[in-house]
Image: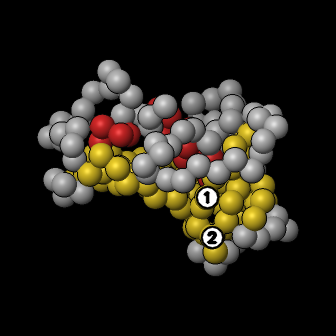
Amino acid sequence: MKLTARSALVVVGALVAAAAGTVPATAAPSYDLNPAGNGQSVQPFTCDGLGDLMIRTNNNHSSDSGGWSSAKIVSGGTGTLIPVSFTFSAYDVTKGAQLFSFTQPKGDGNANHQQTTYHCYQTMTGTLADLLEPGDEVPPGADLSDTVTATFSAEAVHVG
């Protein structure tokens, strides 16, 4: 399955412990540290101040953004990440233009405001064709052969 704007929202949720979404094989490695397939996925992320981590998240929640549940750190560190906000952006490297971006804060920006947060992110690069589902519209001014970088990031509280 390829990454779409809607599934990107789900992948963003992976960092903030929502759904993990799918990533094209050419964009990022696949990790299967959860062989039981119990509705969870493991994703690589980097968190400033915490380093490179593998986190386990639920695959399904009831909302488009996947909800605001926590992510368990399974390697590279210990503890749990609790999301405070997340951002998704797609940049067309070939054209030198932002395709789109959005940020969603938890609690209208009032959540966990007295706790230290860490900036965590995951970046994937591939052609726009690799990142779109069949039938998805090509953003204005972009071509399917364009190289695109998609960045998922979140501010998260680290517990444990």
In this view, the residue farthest toward the right is 160
Q: CA distance from mark 2 to mark 1?
A: 7 Å
Position of 7 with respect to 111 (left or right) is left
Residue in the image at 36% along x and 34% along y: 132
Circles 2 and 1, Cβ within 8 Å, touching? The answer is yes
Q: In the drawing, what numbered circle is on residue 52?
A: 2
What is the secondary structure assignment of the residue under circle 2? strand
Residue furthest out toward the bottom: 49
The reply to whether residue 109 is visible in this rendering is: no
Residue 130 point in image, percent of width and height: 36, 40
- Kind of residue at badge 2: Asp
The amino acid at mark 1 is Pro
Q: Residue at x 44, y 34 (%)?
A: 2
Q: Residues within 10 Å of mark 1 (few under 14, many from 20)?
A: many
Do we see residue 10 in this rendering?
yes
* 149 w.r.t. 137: above or below: below
Which residue sits at x=68%, y=27%? Answer: 62
Provide the secondary structure element on which disc 1 rests. Answer: strand
Is 87 drawn above or below residue 11 in the view shown? below
* Mark 2 or mark 1: whose residue is earlier in sequence: 1
Choose between 50 and 128: the one closer to the eye.
Answer: 128
Q: Residue at x 67, y 54 (%)?
A: 83
Which residue does the numbered mark 1 point to in the structure image?
44
Q: In the rendered view, tell whether residue 89 sits above or below residue 2.
A: below
Report the front residue among 55 and 13.
Answer: 55
Q: Most extreme residue toward the top, as rendered? A: 135
Spot occupied by residue 107 in the image (x, y as percentages of width and height)? 64, 47
The crowding category of the residue bearing disc 2, from other C-alpha atoms within 10 Å (few below 14, some 14 to 19, many at least 20), is some
Percent position of residue 5, x then y: 42, 35
- Left or right placement of residue 32 versus residue 30 in this view: right
Instruction: Locate residue 49: give its quadrant.
Output: bottom right
Residue 8, percent from left and from top: 48, 40
